[in-house]
Each structure stands twice: as structure tokens, then as C-alpha cells.
Amino acid sequence: MSQATKKTAPTFEKMEKIVSLAKRRGFVFQSSEIYGGLNSCYDYGPMGILLKNNVKQAWWKAVVQERDDICGLDSSILMHPQVWIASGHVDSFTDPLVDCKKCKQRFRADHVEGPACPECGGELTEARQFNLMFKTFMGPVEDSTAVVHLRPETAQGIFVNFKNVQTVSRKKVPFGIAQIGKAFRNEITPGKFTFRTREFEMMEIEYFVHPEQAKERHQMWLEERKNWYIRLGIKPENLRLRQHGRDELAHYADDCYDVEYNFPWGWSELEGIANRTDYDLKAHEKVSGKDLKYFDEEKNEHYVPYVIEPSAGVDRSSLAFLADAFEEDETPTAKGGVEVRTVLRFSNALAPFKAAILPLSKKEPLTATAEKLYQDLRKEFFCDYDDRGSIGKRYRRQDEVGTPYCITVDFETANDNAVTVRDRDSLQQERISIDGLKSKLRDMLSK
Ligand code: ATP
């Protein structure tokens, strides 16, 4: 560690600082900003898309690539209208809504404490149920027969493909199907930056088990998923599991836990891990008339499997990774003041850029060497190249986007064929030969 004293910004300002950094450094922009923005919709900028892709890749690697019992799927967003009738979403995918009689604002009833409007203190209406699914029309005729929904979860695409995937993969229960994709919910009260939006991405697993194994596998997934966040850098003290009360359970769930993160505004859900029982497959059997039972050859038994569903949000987890990585170091200056260094301490797997190549001068032979190094390294890692401004400013720019290693090509490089590698967290600098740099970097980044 350097002499810098680590200090995290006080909670009340922290979110504002994160939002401002996210915009300034190209993580997240307001959607349609030049038109004044579209409420609760966001665009991911050059850094944000790298972070988000890394989150998705890390999830896919952990749940599909490294496991024998899960395979992937990419189902369509628009599905047959019967899907949402069978699944219960048309009738039950609702939130209770209240209106303020005075200021006319709308709120989710379960987000309002007490009988008065949280904005103006006015009287609230009785709660009524509001369906969260977006509707649109398929084809050229806009009548009720052409209504389709934008999916509010990716799960139903998995359920309706259960037989297809089981048949082609020849997987035996217990096995799972994983999918990453967009979902849409017409949230009554979106807000808190990218935490609750109307368009978002989900990472979902439907894990099919024998009904007798459901409870045990549910517990296994709780541990599995919690550890995934910790492995990717979330501080364990900022993560917890919370079991739903009976009154909170979704219409399909028998039991559910949330993985919660301690966001700057408090504990909030990152991922729901539910026991959906055989609710969905049985519902689709009934409405479609198709047999969705699994046949266990060894036991000669036909049954509808239970389903354990770890369902995570890409946007929410990216925001949690960003918030958890955000730190401000204060270093005393020679003049008696303090210098604040903003740094995103992303894990190596999630850092948008893995390394930055910084030639000390724009002159030859430094530039040619730095360019060559950049072209070579970027084949393997996402790298940045920056030759503008003082080296101190360039280090700060990289710290602010969380680049783990800065590689400086200097005037000595031509003599010793080596570069200086600076570690974002320890601030230690090490002289490393260019010949061994790529494998050394690979080594350091694999941690
Ligand atoms: P909340 O009560 O916070 O709105 P939920 O319990 O309805 O969430 P689930 O149906 O369990 O959420 O969805 C699974 C995951 O999808 C959530 O844990 C979250 O990460 C993500 N998610 C759900 N709704 C949204 C949203 N409106 N914006 C961003 N992510 C969302």
C-alpha cells in the first residue's frame, strides 16, 4: 500500500459522485439526452459497455462454461400471447398503485409509508392493481387480436423451450438453462439511477430438479450466487441474503431469497433466488396441451420438475460493482493540503481496460515502441493508449475508470528494453522487460 490513506466518501454524497463519474467517464448517459432525456432509460457509454459485457461474460463463464449441468439459450423477446396468460403474468404481474388526489403523482403502494402522499402530504387513493407488462401490436393491424407483450422476464422463453433443450442436450435432471437478455417492465416508480428502470437486462437460470431435491438445491444456489459477487470484488460485508416474507412472494414462488447489496441509499435487491416449484411447466402443459414431463430412465418415472431460479439484473449488478469499486484516497501534499485520488478498484475480471500504455513523450523512439506494444497487447486484453497531458493526469484518468495497470514507455526503454508498470491499488512501480510483459500481465490479471 502507498502512503495514501484510504477513505470512502460519506454515504450521502457517494451516490451523487458515482452518478457524476459515470457520466464524465462514459459509463452511463441519460437516454435521448439531447431531447431532455427519457425518464428511467439509460445508455451505456464506451466504459459502461465494457463493464457490462465483463459482468455478463463473468456470469456466463461461471454458470455455463465452467459447469456440466447448465446450457445456454437466447429466446426471442416477443412470444405467443398465450405464454403470458399461462404463466399468470396477464392476471398477476401487477404492483399496487396509489394516486395522490392533490398533486396527481403516482406511487407504488408498498413504497409509501403511511396514508399521506410522500411529495405533498395530500390524500392518497385506494390501492389498485397495475399490470407492469408493456403491450405492443404485431403486424400491420392494431387491434386486440394483434396484442403482444414485451417480456417482463426471460424465464418464460426458457420454460417453453424446456423440452427442446433437454432433448438436444440429453441432460439429465438436475440440469439448468441459462439466458441473458432484455426485459421490460412499466414500473410505476422507477428511479435511483440504473437501479430500477423500465428496460433492463437480466441474467437468469432455470434449474430443473426433482421435487424432493428442490429445497437442498435452493440452498446450494444461494451460496453459489452470493459467492459469485464476492469473487468479482464485492466486499462481503456489503452483501447479504434476505428471505421473503409470505406476503412478498411472487405469484409463482413457494420460497424466495434476495441477494441484497448495501447501496449508498441502503440494502436493496440485486438478485432474486426463488423456488418456482412446478408452477410454470404445469401451467404451460395445461394451456398448450403439450406434455412437458421429464422421463427419468433409471427410475422409470415421469414427472414435472421443480425449478430453482437465480434471477439477476445486469444493470443492478453493474451499478453495485461500480459503487463497491468507488473509493477516494486522500494523500497529504507537500504544501500541507490534501490531494484526493478517485479510483475504481474493480476486480481484474471486470475492469473495462486491463492496461493503459502511456509513452512519456510524443517523440521517437518512444512512440514507435509504445504503439507496437499497444498493438501487441490489445490482441489479448482491452487496452487504452494515452499520450496526452502530464503523466500524473494520465494516471488519474486511468484510476477513474479502474485500469489495473499503467505501462509507461520512457527514455530508458530504448536502452533496457523495459517499461515501468504501475499498480492501480498499491501504486507500486515495477520495471519489467518488454519481452516478458505479456505473460507477466496475463499472470497478474488472472488473479
Ligand atoms: P424490485 O422489487 O426491486 O422491483 P423484483 O423483485 O420485481 O425487483 P425480480 O422479478 O426478482 O425483481 O427480478 C430479478 C432481478 O431483475 C432483480 O433482482 C433485479 O436485479 C432485476 N430487475 C428487476 N426489475 C428491474 C428494473 N425495473 N430495473 C432494473 N433491474 C431490474
Image: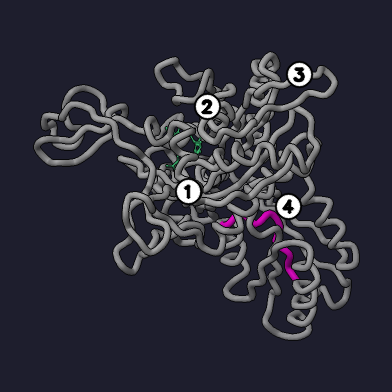
Relative height, residue 369 to residue 319 (above, below): below
| Residue identified by numbered label 4 | 428
The reply, left or right, for residue 359 in relation to residue 272 is right
Name the kind of residue labelled 2 in the image: Asp
> If you read the primary sequence from the N terminus, does the residue marked by circle 4 or circle 3 appear first?
3
Mark 2 crowd level (few <14, some 14–19, many ≥20, 10 Å Cα): many
The question of residue 404 being in magenta is answered with yes
Q: Which residues are magenta?
A: 401-409
Residue at 33% x, 69% y: name it: 34
Q: Which mark is residue 258?
A: 2
Q: Residue 91 appears in which quarter of the rendering? A: top left
Relative height, residue 63 to residue 377 (above, below): above
Which of the two residues, 53 or 407, is positioned nearer the viewer here? 53
Name the kind of residue labelled 3 in the image: Glu
The question of residue 104 being in magenta is answered with no
The reply, left or right, for residue 277 in relation to residue 34 is right
Can I make out residue 187 in this image?
Answer: yes
- For the residue with label 3, is its CB less than 8 Å from the closest atom of ligand 1? no
How far apart are labels 2 and 4 at the CA level? 39 Å
